[in-house]
Image (cartoon, rainbow, N blue to C red):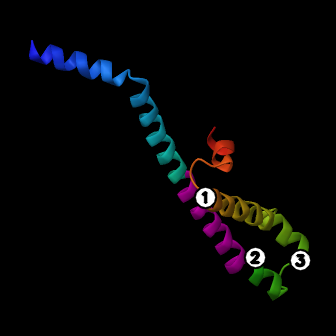
Amino acid sequence: KAQSAIRSWLYRRSQDPEVQIGKRLRQRLKIEAELLSTEATHVNNLNIIVSDYLEPMIESHLFKESEIRDIFANVASLQKCNSTLLRDLNLGGCGSAVFDCCIG
């Protein structure tokens, strides 16, 4: 009988709007942290591609400009765009309009 009462109380509590909001907020914060971490890793990888591969290839003059464009396509543009996004995510913080745009 006590077990049934506890289960009933736990069920009612789980349906409480305040509890649901808390769960949603924790889930959102976890998603925001993951987005920030993933974007930082992505930007770091793009920076490595540009500094360790693209720039040395350009400076070496061993490759035609068209070959470098074919290999790296829009890496520099992606680096700039994703760096800006990462900066805005860091500046805006959790719950900002930038995160709202990314995860709703």
Q: Residue at x 63, y 49 (%)?
A: 96
Query: Foreground residue, 85 or 7?
Result: 7
Image height of 41 relative to 54, above or below: above
Q: Residue at x 47, y 47 (%)?
A: 30
Query: Foreground residue, 56 or 90?
Result: 90
Query: Foreground residue, 78 or 100?
Result: 100
Query: Foreground residue, 41 or 94?
Result: 94
Q: Position of residue 13 (x, y in %)?
A: 31, 23
Q: Amino acid at mark 2?
A: Leu
Instruction: Name the outermost residue toward the bottom.
Output: 60
Quadrant into which the N terminus falls: top left
For mark 3, what is the residue? 64
Q: Position of residue 93 (x, y in %)?
A: 59, 56
Label 2, label 1: how far apart the Cα atoms are: 21 Å
Q: Residue at x 57, y 56 (%)?
A: 36
- Label the magenta part by its dominant secondary structure: helix
Q: Secondary structure at mark 3?
A: loop
- Res 19 label: none
Label 1, label 3: how far apart the Cα atoms are: 32 Å
Circle 2 packing at 10 Å, graded few (<14), some (14-19), many (20+), is some
- Res 39 label: 1
Q: Amino acid at mark 3?
A: Lys
Q: Which residues are magenta?
A: 35-54
Quadrant into which the C terminus falls: top right
Label 2, label 3: how far apart the Cα atoms are: 12 Å
Q: Residue at x 80, y 64 (%)?
A: 77
Q: Secondary structure at mark 1?
A: helix
Choose top left, top right, bottom left or bottom right for residue 45: bottom right
Image height of 15 relative to 68, above or below: above
For mark 2, what is the residue? 54
Depth check, mark 1 against mark 3: the one in front is: 1
Q: Is residue 51 magenta?
A: yes
